[in-house]
Amino acid sequence: MYYTAMRKKKALIVSDGKKGHLNQAIAYCKLKDMEFEIIEIEFKNRFFKLLAYLFDPFSISTYSLFKPFPSIPNGYDEVVAVGSSTYYIAKLLAKELNIKATALNYPKGFVRGFDTIYSPFHDRIRKKGVKEIPINFASLPTKKVYSPKKKCVGLIVGGDNKVFKLKKERLEEVVKFIFTHFKGYEKAVSTSPRTSKEIEEWLEMEKFDYKVIYSKTPINPLGDFVRECEVVFITIDSTSMISEAVSGGKSAIEVIMLDGAEKENKYLRLVKELEKEGCLHLFDGKIAYTNKKIDLRKYL
């Protein structure tokens, strides 16, 4: 009797060069246990991107809008796209290769032609044919960069965005709380690409046992923090960081509110919904020790 081993499925990730988008696509492939390859594709300029929006409703497909890229061989089962610059070309490639096209965020302006469209809850896309997921596609970084020698607590610092301003005074309150309430613990801190120079310089002077100052050491220890620390504090300014934090590990997650949110926004919608589910706590001077994790595989 002969047995034929099943081939592992393989995805082609179309990247726009943005790390956050690429991380979502890689997480999706890992959750589906798919092999993947990445191709970075770029429009010739903004005018050609505008043409893609004009061409798509009329099913006009052309590679001439893009800078040259290598030919794509057969052997893929799915094209995965995240970001407005990837949707048009992803559908074109899927059609040529006769495979599925998947969008991991709502592809506004390019909806027709995708086999599957996912959208996180906080984006509020309530449309037929769109699969809603509770967080961004995320998986914890697996590279081991932090190995604590005893019980530990972590702080992950983001920065300003279109909604929030990260002021040093707000963070000082949290750092003071950590050093007061976690005596005897190892204390770890990490900044991000958006953290201001002022805050990085200040944190570098604080007596944390482990520090990642991103402008000097561009690594992401979030996975280790969430796996190793009893509690991890995270600023509210990144849906990607929060999604990663509730995707695995064991840590209780405390989200730090920042200045500037006068109206409802996707960040608040995300944390409030996750707080209801027991996945995190919006820090209010007390620790809730909520650490329920989300397994996105059940949404696939």
Image (spheres, grey):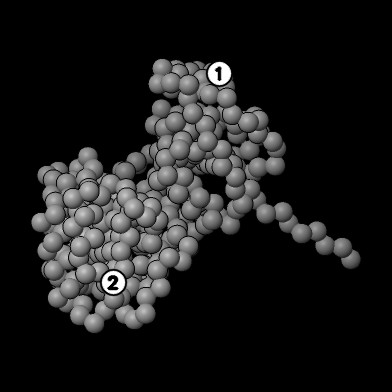
Residue 47 image label: none
Please name whichever residue, 122 or 170, is drawn nearer the observer in this view of the structure. 170
Q: How many numbered marks does the figure carry? A: 2
In the figure, residue 151 lies in which quadrant? bottom left
In the figure, residue 272 lies in which quadrant? bottom left
Mark 1 crowdedness (10 Å alpha carbons): few <14, some 14-19, many ≥20: few
Percent position of residue 57, x then y:
47, 21
Q: Relative to 111, does residue 143 appear above or below in the rendering?
A: below
Q: At 73% across and 56% down in the image, what residue appears?
A: 6
Q: At 38% across and 52% down in the image, what residue appears?
A: 218
Question: Quick check: can you spot residue 137?
Answer: yes
Distance from the alpha carbon under mark 1 to that under mark 2:
53 Å
Please name whichever residue, 119 or 149, is drawn nearer the observer in this view of the structure. 149
Q: At 42% across and 44% down in the image, what residue appears?
A: 19
Nearer the camera: disc 1 or disc 2: 2
The residue to which callout 2 is attached is 209
The residue to which callout 1 is attached is 64
In this rendering, position of residue 218 left or right of residue 269: right
Helix, strand or loop at mark 1: helix
Q: Relative to 284, does residue 179 appear above or below in the rendering?
A: below
Percent position of residue 111, x then y:
45, 32
Return the disc, 1 or 2, that comes first in the chain's sequence. 1
The residue under label 2 is which amino acid type? Asp
Question: Quick check: can you spot residue 252?
Answer: no
Q: Locate the N terminus by quadrant.
A: bottom right
